[in-house]
Amino acid sequence: MEHEQLVKYILAPMTAAIVAMIGWSLINVIELKEEIATVKTDVKYISKQVDLMQEKLALKMESEIYASK
């Protein structure tokens, strides 16, 4: 009888709590992966824009050098 009460009142809720914590952790990991993917996309976009700006600046500086000669 004591074993059944132990399982009913202690082990079952403890198991449910552990399963809930694991599920919550997995959800957080999935959300974190989605946020990382968003950040990677943003970084790629920013990098492309910086590259374009560098190219335009280089062309402008080149044309100014030739114009001053």
Image (tube, grey):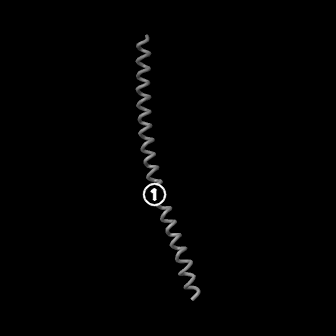
Depth order, front residue of 20/41: 20
Q: Residue furthest front?
A: 9
Q: Position of residue 65 (x, y in %)?
A: 44, 15
Image quarter of residue 63? top left
Left or right side of 8 for 41: left
Q: Secondary structure at mark 1?
A: helix
**Residue at 41%, 39% in the rendered image:** 45
Depth order, front residue of 54/8: 8
Q: Position of residue 29 (x, y in %)?
A: 48, 57
**Residue at 43%, 37% in the rendered image:** 46
In the picture, the quarter occupied by the N terminus is bottom right
State whether residue 49 is above or below residue 27. Answer: above
Q: Residue furthest right?
A: 2
Q: Which residue is mark 1?
A: 30
State whether residue 2 is above or below residue 44. Answer: below
Q: Amino acid at mark 1?
A: Ile
- How many tags in the picture? 1
In the picture, the quarter occupied by the C terminus is top left
Depth order, front residue of 11/68: 11
State whether residue 15 is above or below residue 66. Answer: below
**Residue at 41%, 21% in the rendered image:** 60
Q: Position of residue 17 (x, y in %)?
A: 52, 70
Image quarter of residue 51? top left
10 Å crowding of disc 1: few (<14), some (14-19), many (20+): few
Left or right side of 11 for 52: left
Image quarter of residue 9? bottom right
Q: Position of residue 3 (x, y in %)?
A: 57, 85
**Residue at 45%, 45% in the rendered image:** 40
